[in-house]
Image (cartoon, rainbow, N blue to C red):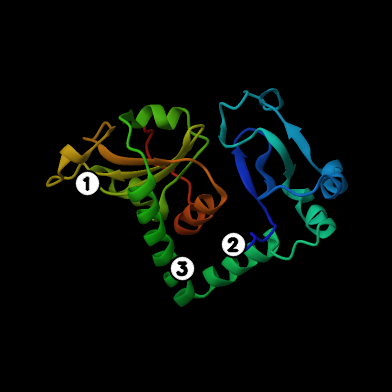
Amino acid sequence: MEAKQLRLETKCYDANEYGYLYGLNQKIPDSEFEKIKPYMKNFRRKDFIDGIIKVTGRPEGYRCLKEDVPKIEEILNIENTVAKREEKIRKAMQDPHEKEKLKDQTLQWIQALYTKGGTQPEQDLSRLVIHSTKIYDPNDSYKNGKKEGRGVLFIYTPHGIWYIINNSGENANTSLNNVKTHDGGAIGYRLMYDDNLDTIVRIYSEENLYTGDKLY
């Protein structure tokens, strides 16, 4: 089996203070870890302002701030750097043709990941929103389509990232809905946080935050 390439990846998102925290994608020898330990902190629940109420992902363990990522990558001779990955995405998003291809691809991944691996517990949209760390509304689809029963949201919560598909239009099959809303309901899938999922959600949504009417 081919060994995974060593890299730093996002482990969690803290809405209150730290933003994204990073960690290694695999264990390394203790002698190597000692070299980077000055830039890492062994985070615990008590290190966050509200415990982990406003954290999405896996906050506990050795993590570093974004500003320390390049230092760790240099010490460990990591070639697949966070900056390189971000630059690749930035360049693609600047080219209209490449941007369209990338967004189409990420939507396919999102739909496949959530429908095949996501769970669909009964939930109330207002409860998700109240406990959210951030909410993305791609192209303002939910904000502008809410009254017609259209649009999607990605809601980051302490228990994972939800993919919400508004399903309250005139001809909607509401029997598919598992998320209660003021407008008739939605289809909701939940996946646990991971770096790859977070990346494709951020690409597809272009990190456009929801700015519509209150959802609770």
Q: Position of residue 94 (x, y in %)?
A: 54, 71
- Residue at point 69% right, 35% down? 61
Task: Identify the image quadrant of the C terminus.
Answer: top left
Left/right of residue 185 with respect to residue 208 in the rendered view = left
Residue type, mark 2 in image: Met
Tell me, for residue 1, which label it has, or none.
2
Left/right of residue 197 with respect to residue 175 in the rendered view = right
Q: CA distance from mark 2 to mark 3?
A: 29 Å
Q: Regarding mark 3 in the picture, which secondary structure is present there?
A: helix
* Residue at the far front in the pictured view: 1
Tag nearer the camera, 2 or 3: 2
Residue type, mark 3 in image: Leu
The answer, for residue 40, to whether it is visible in the render is yes
- Residue at point 63% right, 32% down? 16
**Looking at the picture, does residue 80 appear above or below residue 30?**
below
Q: Position of residue 111 (x, y in %)?
A: 35, 54
- Count residues near mark 2 (Cα–Cα under 10 Å), then give few for <14, some for 14-19, many for 20+: few
* Residue at the far left in the pictured view: 171
Residue type, mark 1 in image: Glu
Q: Position of residue 128 (x, y in %)?
A: 41, 31
